[in-house]
Image (cartoon, helix red, strand yellow):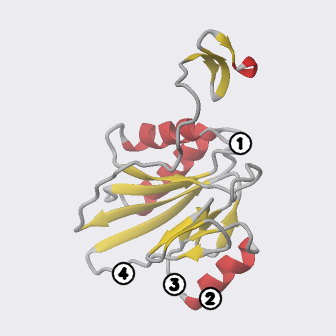
């Protein structure tokens, strides 16, 4: 499930959950949804359903990404690994990078599952407000978390990364940063550029 934050998030997931009992629901709020009708930037919800006798799915959440992003990733990976009895062969991940550090959350996941383990997914968004994002798992709505789906069975996974940003201005080189905080570009204070 991918949805705009213009909807009441709890009611949205409650409605989806009631209409498909027993279904593993996972997803996040976004800054635009993509469907067969194209790209929507406002007030839309996109749901993709997968059913298979040959693929198994497990869901998990890593909470409190704001306080310890790596631990949230480890919590998510531990739950997926435990619930799948070690049979998981790839994972989808949707995480809050506004309140936490996505790179550290991913490192926690890969520390538990192995550096070469295939993880795909993306960051939650909030219609470009950069204030609060939401993650969905089962019939619950989270914020400040990472949610994921472990997958195993007869399937093939491949990933391609793209983004919708267009370059503006001249290219700059990051010459100093601390964690996710940008301090310098081209040897000058970032705030002065």
* Quarter location, residue 85: bottom left
- Whichever of labels 1 and 3 marks the residue nearer the N terminus, that label is 3
Residue contact at pointers 1 and 3, CB within 8 angstroms: no
* Quarter location, residue 90: bottom left
Residue contact at pointers 4 and 3, CB within 8 angstroms: no
The residue shown at (70%, 51%) is 144
Q: Give the label on residue 18, or none.
A: 2
User: Please, what secondary structure does the residue beneath circle 4 have?
Assistant: loop
Distance from the alpha carbon under mark 1 to that under mark 4: 34 Å
Distance from the alpha carbon under mark 4 to that under mark 3: 12 Å
> Of circles 4 and 3, which is in front?
4
Label 3 belongs to which residue?
Answer: 22
Q: Give the crowd class for mark 4: few <14, some 14-19, many >=20 residues within 10 Å.
A: few
Residue contact at pointers 4 and 2, CB within 8 angstroms: no
Distance from the alpha carbon under mark 3 to that under mark 2: 9 Å
Q: Nearer the viewer, residue 133 or 90?
A: 133
Q: Quadrant of the C terminus?
A: top right
Distance from the alpha carbon under mark 2 to that under mark 1: 30 Å
């Amino acid at each position: 499930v991918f949805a705009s934050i213009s909807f009441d998030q709890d009611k949205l997931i409650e409605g989806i959950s009631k209409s498909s009992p027993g279904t593993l629901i996972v997803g996040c709020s976004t800054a635009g949804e993509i469907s067969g009708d194209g790209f929507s930037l406002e007030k839309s919800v996109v749901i993709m359903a997968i059913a298979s006798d040959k693929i198994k799915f497990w869901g998990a959440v890593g909470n409190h990404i704001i306080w310890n992003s790596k631990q949230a990733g480890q919590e998510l990976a531990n739950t997926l690994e435990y619930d799948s009895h070690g049979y998981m062969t790839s994972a989808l991940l949707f995480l809050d990078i506004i309140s936490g550090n996505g790179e550290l959350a991913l490192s926690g996941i890969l520390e538990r599952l192995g550096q070469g383990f295939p993880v795909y997914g993306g960051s939650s968004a909030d219609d470009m407000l950069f204030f609060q994002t939401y993650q969905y798992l089962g019939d619950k709505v989270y914020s400040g978390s990472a949610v994921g789906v472990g997958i195993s069975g007869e399937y093939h996974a491949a990933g391609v990364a793209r983004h919708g940003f267009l370059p503006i201005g001249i290219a700059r080189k990051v010459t100093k940063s601390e964690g996710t905080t940008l301090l310098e570009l081209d040897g000058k204070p970032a705030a002065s550029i």
